[in-house]
Image (cartoon, grey):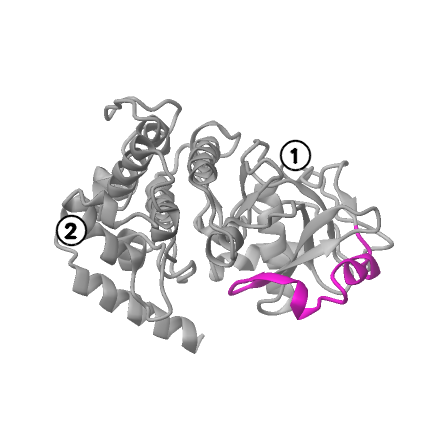
């Protein structure tokens, strides 16, 4: 069953990994686990624990709505507490048919198995009984979104700056030094978990794509992602490469600076609101009023400068993540200052450079509304 699903999943979206061979059929999780015969899917690490359904039910109070901490187009994320007291985040796949969920599950596992960095979330196990579940480490602080947007306490500036640097380091790893060249595609505050020391960890690789060295980009036909974080070239043409993550990271920086959401309830775009202020260097008007004067002015300026570059409409004007970290630290960086094998021009730079300059604010909002309508109809 799995092999046929994996062969057909490209109809819906490009696979995140070449289809594995010899993947065993899933039955009840308490009797067997996945296994594969080729190197690509020696994927399920021996250290990963296989969870029974009852364990996940007890941990989440039977997936109570009170334990729900995140919800997307294809999954729900619940906070849980295991019997040994460990806090976990349990991702439950919900979208589509069982075959589609299986395909999504294997794609995400195929990404996670190659990821190992202090600024990426740690998978501790999975469950396939009564549904498909991923179980990750979780600290009491939860996600960046919960602290920045949903807490009664103001997230202090030092933590915000630390989160910006750590998230950037995690993206450098995914783009340039990971064994697989990975495009995350869904960088947002909800997908940044915070450890007990407020170190950020990138999570949720459900939409991620890996790019072989010989590939310049992905072109996707199915519109997926989070409104407010989407790069123009993705909205217009479905182009996915490193620069789509850079744009999303720029939006995240704006959230850290302003305390505002990427897309407010009145559907006001943070990018559209902040860009005129950035262009006029009116940084003080951007700063979260709840911070008062309790922030480092130089660090604030560094984050604002980096954000201004990351949200450029033209992908060729955006820095690579290896260039963003020096910017965040206030160090000079040139177009060739990055490191790693991906420093060639990205496809979106080559293809989209001229067209995007004519991509107006009105056109962006029009396309965004069109894709919202498509998403609602699906």
**Left or right: 110 as drawn, with respect to 88:** left
The 10 Å Cα crowd at callout 2, few under 14, some 14 to 19, many 20 or more, is few
72 and 328: which one is in front?
328
Check residue 319 for magenta coloring. Answer: no
Residue 41, how many percent across, how many down? Answer: 66, 40
- Seen at 31% across and 52% down, the residue is 231
The 10 Å Cα crowd at callout 1, few under 14, some 14 to 19, many 20 or more, is few
In the picture, the disc for residue 59 is none
Height in image: 38 above or below 240?
A: above
* Residue receiving disc 2: 355
Q: Quadrant of residue 79?
A: bottom right
Height in image: 376 above or below 151?
A: below
Q: Quadrant of residue 112?
A: top right
Q: From which residue to which does the magenta span run?
A: 51-76
- Seen at 51% across and 59% down, the residue is 150
* Residue receiving disc 1: 39
Image quarter (top left, top right, bottom left or bottom right) of the N terminus: bottom right
Q: Earlier in the sequence, mark 1 or mark 2?
A: 1
């Amino acid at each position: 069953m799995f092999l046929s699903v994996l062969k057909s999943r490209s109809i819906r979206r490009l696979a995140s990994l070449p289809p594995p061979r010899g993947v065993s059929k899933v039955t009840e999780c308490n009797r067997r686990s996945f296994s594969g015969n080729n190197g690509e899917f020696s994927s399920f690490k021996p250290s990963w624990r296989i969870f029974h359904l009852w364990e996940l039910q007890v941990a989440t109070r039977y997936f109570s709505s009170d334990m729900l901490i995140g919800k997307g187009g294809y999954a729900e994320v619940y906070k849980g507490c295991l019997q040994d007291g460990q806090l976990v985040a349990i991702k439950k796949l919900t979208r589509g048919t069982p075959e589609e969920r299986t395909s999504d599950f294997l794609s995400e596992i195929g990404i996670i198995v190659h990821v190992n960095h202090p600024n990426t979330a740690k998978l501790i196990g999975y469950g396939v009984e009564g549904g498909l579940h991923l179980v990750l480490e979780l600290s009491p602080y939860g996600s960046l979104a919960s602290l920045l947007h949903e807490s009664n306490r103001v997230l202090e500036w030092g933590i915000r700056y630390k989160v910006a640097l750590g998230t950037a380091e995690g993206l450098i790893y995914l783009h340039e030094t990971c064994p697989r060249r990975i495009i995350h595609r869904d960088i947002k505050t909800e997908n940044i978990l915070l450890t007990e020391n407020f170190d950020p960890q990138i999570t949720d690789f459900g939409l991620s794509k890996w790019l072989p060295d010989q590939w310049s980009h992905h072109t996707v036909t199915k519109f997926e992602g989070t409104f407010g974080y989407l790069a123009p070239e993705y909205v217009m043409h479905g182009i996915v490469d490193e620069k789509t993550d850079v744009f999303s990271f720029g939006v995240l920086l704006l959230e850290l600076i302003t305390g505002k959401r990427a897309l407010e309830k009145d559907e006001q775009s943070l990018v559209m609101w902040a860009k005129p202020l950035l262009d006029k260097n009116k940084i003080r008007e951007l700063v979260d009023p709840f911070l008062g004067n309790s922030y480092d002015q130089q660090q604030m300026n560094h984050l604002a400068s980096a954000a201004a570059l990351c949200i450029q409409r033209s992908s060729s004007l955006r820095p690579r993540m290896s260039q963003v970290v020096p910017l965040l630290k206030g160090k000079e960086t040139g177009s060739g200052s990055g490191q790693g094998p991906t420093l060639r021009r990205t496809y979106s730079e080559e293809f989209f450079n001229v067209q995007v300059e004519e991509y107006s604010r009105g056109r962006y909002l029009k396309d965004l509304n069109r894709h919202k309508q498509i998403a609602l109809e699906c």
